[in-house]
Image (cartoon, rainbow, N blue to C red):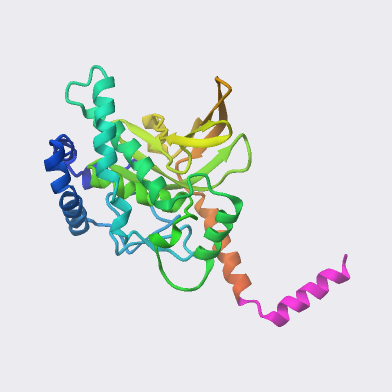
Amino acid sequence: MPVNYEAHKLPVSQSVQEFITLDQAAFDAQKEGFVANRIHDLEQQTQSPATVDSLSDRYSGFIGSHTEVKVSPAAEGFRLDDPEMYTSLIDHSRNFFRVFQDTLRDDPNNDMAFFKAALYATQQTQEEYFGNASPTAEQSAAHDVLVNRASGVNSVADFKNIALCVQRSAAANNMLQVLGVNTALAYGELSLAGDQPFGHTFLLVKTPKGGTRLYDPMNPTHFYDAGQRTSSRPRYPKVPTEIEASSGYYETDIQARFQKDGENKIVKVPAVYHLEANKEEVLAMMRLREMLSSVSVKDTVSLGEGLDSVR
C-alpha cells in the first residue's frame, strides 16, 4: 500500500530553511535551542507504535524515543533516545543548502536545494555519529551479537561503530523529520548483482513536488582516492508510483567511484530492492528460532549422535 504521508505531514521545512539562512551570529546563538525544540515538538506529536519491526507496515513519521525498533520481531530492539545523534545535523544542512542554492537552476523557492541539502546533511551526520561508514565483517558480527543477546532494549548509542541498515535508516528517518522532510521507514529486501535477496531496511522519501525517492543510508556512493575512502554522498533514485503502490521490485544500482593516478573509475553493482519484507520468511525464521530455543542440551546431544550415525 502507498504511504499516507499526509497523515503525518509536518509543514516545517520552510521554517527550517529560514532558520539555516540566518546570519552566522544568530544561527550559532540559536541552533542548539532550535534543534532541541524541534525534537521536543516531534516527540509530543508522534504517533509511533510501541514496536517497529519487519512484520510492521511502513511507518511514516518521527519515531518517538518510546518506540522499540527491531531488526526482526525476535531480535532485541533499540530506541532512538540519544540527542547527540542530531548534534551536527543543522550545521551540515546550512552548509549543503548554500552549495545547492548556488548550483540548482529552475528552483525559485529553493525547495529542491533544501531537499538535497537535507539528504546530504543526514548522510554525513549519521556517518559521523555511527562511525563505521563501510562496516567490516567483524563489526557486522558484533552488531549481530548485540541484537541477539537477551539483555533488554538497547540504546541507539550502543551501535556506534557497529551500526547496520536498520539503525542507520531509523536514525536518518528522524534526522529528515527534524528538518521537515516526509519519510517512511521501509523493511524490505535487497539483492545485489543477482545474488539471493536478504532482509534490508531503507527509507522512502517524499520530494517537494510529491514524488518518491528511495534513500538507502547504508549504501551511498562512496568515493575513494588511492584506495582510501574519502567521502560519500546519498543516492536517492526516483521510485515510480506504480511500484510504490504495489510494494513491488525496484531495479537500480549501487555505485562507488575511484580515483587513482589522475584517473576516475565508476563501479556499478546492479541492485534490486523489494519494497516489502518477505513476511512468510520472517515468520518461518521466528518459528525455527522458537523451536531451537525449546530444544534441551540432552536433545541436542541426541540429535548430534543421530546425525553421526548416518554420516
Q: Nearer the viewer, residue 179 or 129?
A: 129
Q: Nearer the viewer, residue 122 or 230?
A: 230
**Residue at (39% x, 29% y) in the render:** 238
Q: Nearer the viewer, residue 245 or 60?
A: 60
Residue range in magenta is 294-311
Q: In screen coordinates, is 180 left or right of 253?
A: left
- The quadrant of the image that shows the N terminus is top left
Outermost residue to the top: 106
**Residue at (72% x, 79% y) in the render:** 299
**Residue at (27% x, 52% y) in the render:** 62
Outermost residue to the bottom: 298
Q: Is residue 233 visible?
A: yes
Q: Quadrant of residue 39?
A: bottom left
Q: Nearer the viewer, residue 31 or 205?
A: 31
Membership of 296 in magenta stretch: yes
- The quadrant of the image that shows the C terminus is bottom right
Q: Total of numbered circles in the picture?
A: 0
**Percent coordinates x, y for residue 52 in the rendering:** 38, 58
